[in-house]
Image: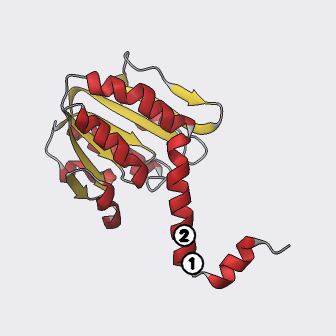
Amino acid sequence: MISVVPVLKQLAPATLRHAIYDRLLDREIPSYPDRVHMRDVILPILAAHPGTNILNVGCRRYSVDINSRLKAAGKSVSTIDIDPDAARWGAETHVVGDATCLDAHFPPSTFDVVIFNGVFGFGIDSGDEIDRAFVGLAHVLKPGGILILGWNVDRVADPIPFMRSDVFRPHAGFASATFDDSTHTYRAFERS
């Protein structure tokens, strides 16, 4: 029997192979336990939150659902992604920019909520980058604002030690979440 992968490598250019892989992954990701938790637990809490301005950092096909659910709940959603091609999955208000420089893209205290999910370990990897991201997050979040932080523990060191405890404190309304079938974890914080 002929294996499909070597045949694909010979017949299909790398860009086509990557596009096929990305499309399959986009269909699979919404069923991951962490994505189900985002959809079924976190988004309803955010939809009921009185704050209306939300920043969703990072855009992919599977993040469109997050933006549309929040918009349907009456929220004003903005997005940012460093990849210009990701703008097609962004909100109506979208910025092509680096998440380590949020303070360069948005005025102080702009957002009631920031969803920073799947960014650490997928482009923001070093301690210096993580530190700069937290500086920007402190800048754009309103006092009392909520930071939903999600990352894969196998892709990046724990980012929590980079947070300044005088700026962010654990949010009492959200329980930390880990998953048996995933290396993803969620934590929620409040801007002091």
Relative to 182, does residue 145 appear above or below in the rendering?
above
| Residue nearest the observer in this picture, 167 or 54 | 54
Relative to 16, does residue 107 appear above or below in the rendering?
above
| Residue nearest the observer in this picture, 172 or 89 | 89
Q: Are marks 1 and 2 in contact (CB under 8 Å)?
A: yes
Most extreme residue toward the right, as rendered?
A: 1
Please, what secondary structure does the residue beneath circle 2 have?
Answer: helix
Residue, disc 2: 18
Q: Residues within 10 Å of mark 1 (few under 14, many from 20)?
A: few
- State the residue at coordinates (46%, 46%): 118
Residue, disc 1: 14
Instruction: Return the x and y of residue 12 as percentages of the image width and height.
Output: 60, 81
Amino acid type for the residue under numbered disc 2: His
- State the residue at coordinates (37%, 33%): 148
Asked where in the image residue 53 lies, by quadrant, the reply is top left
Per the model, the C-alpha gap separating discs 1 and 2 is 6 Å
> Is residue 3 in view?
yes
> Is residue 192 in view?
no
Instruction: Return the x and y of residue 55 as percentages of the image width and height.
Output: 26, 42
